[in-house]
Amino acid sequence: MKKQNITQLLAFSLVILSLIIASCQQLNENPLASINSVTYYNTENDLITACAGNFYPLVKGWSGLDQTNGYCVAYGGDDVTSLSKLGTGSTGNKDKYSQFDVMNAPATNSAISSAWNPLWGAIRQSNDIIANYNNVTGLSQADKDKYAAIAYFVRGFSYFYLARTWGDVPIITKNLSPGTPAPRDPVAKVYDQIVSDLLWAEKNLPLKSVWGSKYYGFPSKGACQSILAKVYLTMAGYPLKKGASYYALAANIASKVIQSNQYDLWANYGDAFKIANNNGKESVFALQFSIASGMGNNMYGISAMPGEENGWDDYMSELAFYKNYPESPRKRDCFYDTIWVTRNNIRVRVPYDQTLTPRPYFKKFREGGFVNPQQPWVGTTTGGNHVQDLVRYSDVLLVFAEGRAKGLGTPNDSAYWAVNKVRTRAGLPNLVGLSADNFNKAVVDERAWELAGEFHRWYDMTRLEMVEQVVAARDPKEDPIQSKNIRNSYLAPIPSYDMLLNPQWTQNPGY
């Protein structure tokens, strides 16, 4: 079969799928359009095109995981912030981010639908594939199941984001007719569905090396196992609190990824974020982007750059996080703390604390935003060909380290090996001889530093019920937390429009 990238398939699949599934519809609207999807699925190419299009809601531009709107809820993490009123006197159009940063986001927040709607669009498309993939002729059942596993993966992945962010949500495994009520299901039941979908996908997906000879971007067995390990890790903590047995499950699944020998760390931390290393050895699951296909990744480049360099100031580091980050080669690769500014009509570089937004920015996300690194204010661009890594191998190693130690009640040699592999690459000394509590804290800290700015930290803070503790250490130069009940901020508000469409729902507490 000819080798293709998923973004090449997407350019064609969007035309077809727009006629099959209306991905912009609201939750209770009809997911079927004028073409009968039952008759569409005839050949392997039909199925491949549908599977490529399954990712479209997640990457479709300005409303998905290709830009900061899709990650707005995770601004509650202490690793990221946006344009601060204290820095400039106004947040401009960044209120949609700063509201989550100060834990006071309303249901009318202008970005929240960009986090909510794409996940339901992906679920609708998954349901359509699952309902019809067996109609394809000329394929073995194993090959049919291999492609269907993509849809099961996307549905499980999407429900995982929904459950972590909003708690109780409707479980919809068959697309609904207009006006059909969709009550919110308990979050425990949602997690059962997530696990069921991911276990089905794990059984039927091939290894990364097998997909690599055909289609970049399709999820592999390792990608599925990595998400499943993170699901178990989350289920072990808040809100389900299933404890040690689920930490052990997380470690066991993560160990399969490690033992598959499909992945490894780049020698230097900064290499993991170079466009030349797209879909490389450290990439476990990544969304695919291509400017040529009309879908650039807006998380890189101008979005992560300062306004004084003609950037958008969408996200940068919180002060305390940067100051507490261990000095190391990784820190130098992670942050950009001298900024090009104009002084007396001359461009000069100054420390971040002498800029309009006195905060360091993320160096690892700058590539692709400008033509000349010495003149970053010239030729800044939106989007790029960078993949968006949602799981890197270092993440898997740290999931394993945490799960193994908490599952056993004490760290063993394999848990130390996993976390120290990440620390060695970072340029930090090995951890040795720690108590169980100190080891667990060290691993959670390592996750924060290794994955800084990748919008994982908030979900670690909530599952470990450490938001209040982290907020207490917030730098006084940041905008003050406005929530009167921080625990209410563990869940985001359901978008106000969707509450109007579903009057039988009850809004999450505090909104």
Image (cartoon, rainbow, N blue to C red):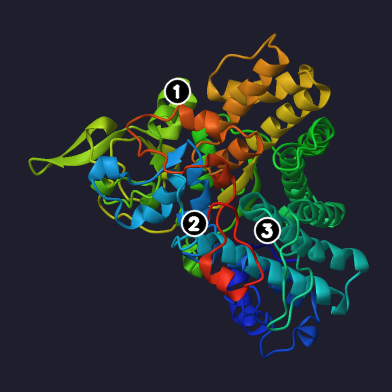
Kind of residue indicated by mark 1: Asn
Q: Relative to 292, is 95 above or below?
A: above
Quadrant in the picture for residue 408: top right
**Crowdedness of circle 2 by 10 Å Cα count: few (<14), some, many (20+)?**
many
Q: CA distance from mark 3 to mark 1?
A: 33 Å
Of residue 176 and residue 426, the one placed in the foreground of this image is: 176
Name the outermost residue toward the top: 433
Q: Earlier in the sequence, mark 2 or mark 3?
A: 3
Q: Residue at x 78, y 51 (%)?
A: 188
* Residue at the disc numbered 2: 385
Q: State the SS at label 2.
A: loop
| Residue 416 place in picture, x, y as percent | 71, 19
Question: Is 350 situated above or below 387?
Answer: above
**Is residue 257 visible to the viewer in this orientation of the structure?**
yes
Q: Position of residue 112 (x, y in %)?
A: 50, 60
Real-space Cα distance between discs 2 and 3? Answer: 23 Å
**Could you give the CA–CA distance between mark 2 and mark 1, rounded to whole angstroms?**
32 Å
Amino acid type, mark 2: Asn
Residue sitting at x 41%, y 37%: 317
Location of residue 505 in the rendering, given as x and y in whole percent from the top left corner? 65, 66
Sequence order check: which comes first, mark 2 or mark 1? 1
State left or right for residue 363 relative to residue 275: left
Image point (48%, 36%), residue name: 78
- The residue singled out by tag 1 in the image is 324
Q: Is residue 125 or residue 102 the one in the foreground?
A: 102
Under circle 3, the secondary element is helix
Q: Which residue is mark 3?
A: 158
